[in-house]
Amino acid sequence: MTEATSPAGGRPFPTHTVVIPDDVEMVGLLGPADEMLRTIERAFPRLVVQVRGNEVYLTGPSEEVQVVERLLDEMLEILAAGQSLNRDAVERSISMLRDRTRERPAEVLTQNIVSSRGRTIRPKTLGQKQYVDAIDTNTIVFGIGPAGTGKTYLAMAKAVAALQAKEVNRILLTRPAVEAGERLGFLPGTLTDKIDPYLRPLYDALHDMIDPESIPRLMAAGTIEVAPLAYMRGRTLNDAFIILDEAQNTSPEQMKMFLTRLGFGSKMVVTGDVTQIDLPGGVLSGLRVVREILEGLEDVHFAELTAADVVRHKLVGAIVDAYGQWDARQHKSDRRPSDRRPGRHHDRRREGVDPA
């Protein structure tokens, strides 16, 4: 430990030295053009980070030094697991360390779900890891969160992994055929042509996880089934991994119908975003009410994903947050008592209060 001058003057900060093992390539740790180093410097502007050979020198407030020392340990563990580092992984690791979560970033970012054609699907955030862990330990899991949090994609990866491990005999993927401003009857073509646009996102995800040439064979054999929710009525689904996507567009009756299809040896994952409901006015969302009904029931888990779990472009997370803040302001203003003259009839509906 050596002394260095504090950028703010006064008592100097000590400099801590972190020695990187000789068998670690520094370019793998720091990235091309020191991209990972620059990411650390941006996240810790009060810290001076210098690298000489295989030694990293950290000068700054002790609490920040401790976080970066732990970060370097996590980065080394990710590399040791055979996974390359990128800016996104480093930024997410920093976020987890700052939040003092119990889970180590390396444990989160190196958990493999399924591999296909040289590509491995794994959780990228703490919320996503808790979600996939919940799928392992519960029979029915609800994945609720905004767009881009991977709730459907990760559920499908778990389904494919379960099929490959022979934990289930088939996968069933379903969605309600409801979208904003459209009805099936107005779409051209046969029934198959009409429902295909609603199911296309599920097909797309399947192609990422299974050899595309084998998908028609698996579907012909009934090992994989992609169908509208209405096709689930009257069935009992045994030894299956069943995923209901876009569940915010189910009615309470449809949600009950779906959940009661559960058979022996099966697992269900229900995904949706309660902020994007496309049901006609006056129709309750089954996803909104199911939590009140099933909360606390054994072997049923509700996983909440947030803007922090968005793994698309960074701007998507910011957009989700901005809309959430706007919705909160609108809700607050709707609840605010309106100006009214004494004796004037007061319509409670204008305050967002149900007259019933």
Image: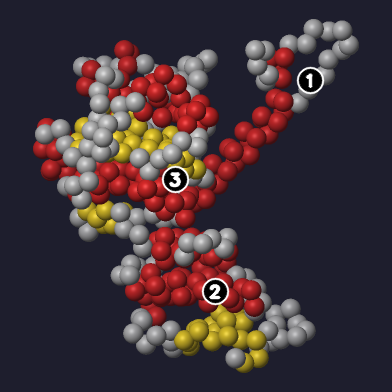
Q: x, y (%) of residue 41?
A: 56, 72
Is residue 172 among what the camera can see?
no
Tag 1 secondary structure: loop
The tag earlier along the polypeptide, 2 or 1, is 2
Give the residue pinned by disc 1: 338
The tag earlier along the polypeptide, 2 or 3, is 2
Residue sitting at 20 percent across and 50 percent down? 165
Left or right of 194 on screen, residue 284: right
Residue type for callout 1:
Ser
Tag 2 secondary structure: helix
Q: x, y (%) of residue 204?
A: 27, 40
Residue type for callout 2:
Val
Residue type for callout 3:
Thr
Residue sitting at 16 percent across and 37 percent down? 223
Q: CA distance from mark 2 to mark 1?
A: 52 Å
- Disc marking residue 68: 2
The tag earlier along the polypeptide, 1 or 3, is 3
Tag 3 secondary structure: loop
Give the residue pinned by disc 3: 149
Left or right of 221 on screen, residue 295: right
Q: CA distance from mark 1 to mark 3?
A: 38 Å
Vertical side of 329 occupied by 178: above or below? above
